[in-house]
Each structure stands twice: as C-alpha cells, then as structure tokens.
Amino acid sequence: TRRSIYVQSPRYQREYFASLFDAADNEQPTPQRNVSTVAPQALFFLNHSWLQHLSGQLVTKIFGQTSDAGQQVEQLYEAILGRLPVEAERLIAQQWLGESSPR
C-alpha cells in the first residue's frame, strides 16, 4: 500500500503486525499482496492493550460530554466509523448501553 512504501522493513525480518494485515512479503523483489479478513485480525483489535486504552479514552471523553444515550451513540459512531448510525444500529446500541453496568 502507499502508506507502507516508506516504512523501513528489513527483508530478512517479517513484522508480526504487518503479517496480520496482509503486508507484502519482504523477501520477494516484486511481492503480491493478498487481501483477506481472518480471525487473527479481529482478535488483534479485540485484545490489544493499545486499542483498549484508546477506546477507554474515547468513551471517557464522550460520556463526560453528555449523559444522553442517543447522543453518546451518535458521537461514538461518528468517531469510530465516520458516520451516524442507522435507526436499527441506534436502537441496538442504546439498548446495550441501558443493559450495561453503571459507569
């Protein structure tokens, strides 16, 4: 990808993170990049401490700005997905917020 063109990457050492997200093989002079979505990618996002930290900061910020569940859902969708939720998503998210433990 264009963004990874400028990243220094020794040919003899393949990065674990890059391999999770289908980076081209460093050992090939003209590598081909496979496109896939696999369980390790999802697990990385669910379990990585850095992402858990960032999501905690986002929730703290948004929940500190408003106590209205509808606004919280909208702000979270905009921050994470870059769009507003459709009505079905909004209802599911608000129901989940109502059932989750008190903050």
Image (cartoon, helix red, strand yellow):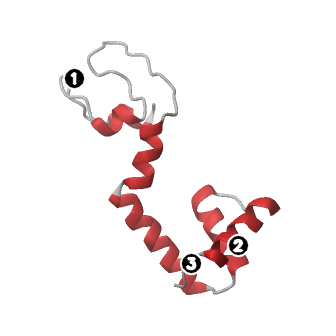
Task: Name which residue lies at 31% across and 12% down.
Answer: 29
Q: Residues within 10 Å of mark 2 (few under 14, many from 20)?
A: some
Whether 4 is drawn above or below 31: the answer is: below
Structural distance between the alpha carbons of marks 3 and 1:
43 Å
Q: Position of residue 59 (x, y in %)?
A: 51, 74
Instruction: Name the residue carrying label 1.
Output: 11
The amino acid beneath tag 2 is Gln
Question: Is residue 86 something one can see in this rendering?
Answer: no
Q: Amino acid at mark 3?
A: Ile
- N-terminal of the pair, mark 1 or mark 2, is 1
In percent of width and height, residue 45 lies at 44, 51
Which residue lies at the image location 27% right of the left edge and 34% below the top edge?
Answer: 15
Residue 47, image x and y in percent?
39, 54
Residue 91, picture quadrant: bottom right
User: Depth-wise, is mark 1 or mark 2 nearer the camera?
Assistant: 2
Q: Which mark is residue 62?
A: 3
Total numbered labels placed on residues in the image? 3
How far apart are the alpha carbons under marks 2 and 3? 14 Å
Quarter location, residue 62: bottom right
Q: Tags 1 and 2 in contact by the CB under 8 Å rule?
A: no
Taking the spot 42% from the left edge, 35% from the top edge, the residue there is 21
Determine whether label 3 and label 1 are within 8 Å by CB: no
Dot 3: element:
helix
User: Identity of the amino acid at label 1?
Assistant: Arg
Q: Nearer the viewer, residue 98 or 83?
A: 98
Q: Would residue 7 appear left or right of 89 to someone viewing this image?
A: left
Can residue 23 be seen here? yes
Q: Which mark is residue 23?
A: none
**Image marks 2 and 3: residues in contact by CB distance under 8 Å:** no
Relative horizontal placement of residue 43, taking residue 64 as reference (left or right): left
